[in-house]
Image (cartoon, rainbow, N blue to C red):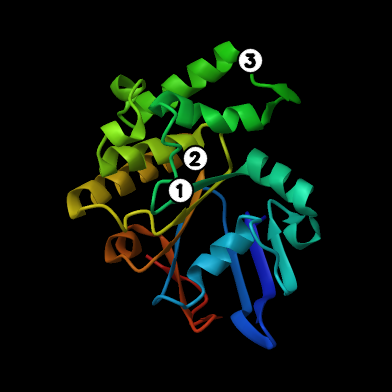
Amino acid sequence: MSLISARSVTKTYRVGDIDVPAIKGVDFNIESASFVAFVGPSGSGKSTLLNLIGCLDHPTSGTLKVLDTDIARLDRRAAARFRGENIGFVFQDFNLIPVLTVFENVEYPLRMVQLDGNKWPAEKRRAQVLRLLEAVGMGDQADKRPDQISGGQKQRVAVARALVSQPKLVLADEPTANLDHDTAYRILELMKKMRDDFGTTFVFSTHDPKIMGAAETTFTLEDGRLQNGGSHV
């Protein structure tokens, strides 16, 4: 069974009196524990497609299933619950909360989701956060705030936060855009290690050649359409 399955998916935005198509009838499958990139120029629809997969937006038409759930059928509350239980996000601008420490930023998703039907107990939250911070090499920075660490360290924290609730899927929108070459390479290696260790599927939107080279499968988007059926490395 595919982790993600799209059939004839479209997304059209209404701007004033004009319909603006962003995604135009795409079909694709993504398997579990894979490393996948949607590539293409700015405005090609990459970020829109990630927003659809991540239940941040709804398709206009077509069927989009994530973990065998037709996400177009979810209302806002159900979509939020589904995201919290199954999907982690890594953003190009990190999206860390400036008033929280590194530890508190990573812990935050655990306060929003449940473990076996109950809230995460404080002891289990602490153990899980520390485990992820150690895994990304930030265990000794737990008490610092985002403005006290580098861009590469912020991205490591963002990766830890995305993985802390043990999601089956992580969506990363241009995650290396604000990083230098060496830091970007280390973050990609870290993500691959996380995939290998936890079986998490990583799906990127990017125009960064480093991510394209690291991906096992790439889908090329142009003007809202897929130009291939998924190229395998």
Question: Which residue carries the number 3 mark?
Answer: 121
- The numbered disc on residue 127 is none
- At mark 3, the secondary structure is loop
Identify whether 201 is placed above or below 218: above
Residue sitting nearer the eye, 206 or 148? 148
- Can residue 107 be seen here? The reply is yes
- Can residue 34 be seen here? The reply is no
Taking the spot 55% from the left edge, 19% from the top edge, the residue there is: 125
Question: Which residue carries the number 2 mark?
Answer: 162
Identify whether 216 is placed above or below 227: above
Mark 1 or mark 3: name the one nearer the start of the chain.
Answer: 1
Task: Give the distance between the C-alpha atoms of the residues marked 2 and 1, in whole angstroms.
Answer: 6 Å
Residue sitting nearer the eye, 146 or 69? 146
The C terminus lies in quadrant: bottom left
Crowd class of label 1 (few under 14; some 14 to 19; many from 20; radius 10 Å): many
- At mark 1, the secondary structure is strand
Evaluate if marks 2 and 1 touch, with contact meaning CB atoms under 8 Å apart. Answer: yes
- The numbered disc on residue 90 is 1
Residue sitting nearer the eye, 63 or 23? 23
Q: How many marks?
A: 3
Q: In which quarter of the image is residue 62?
A: bottom right
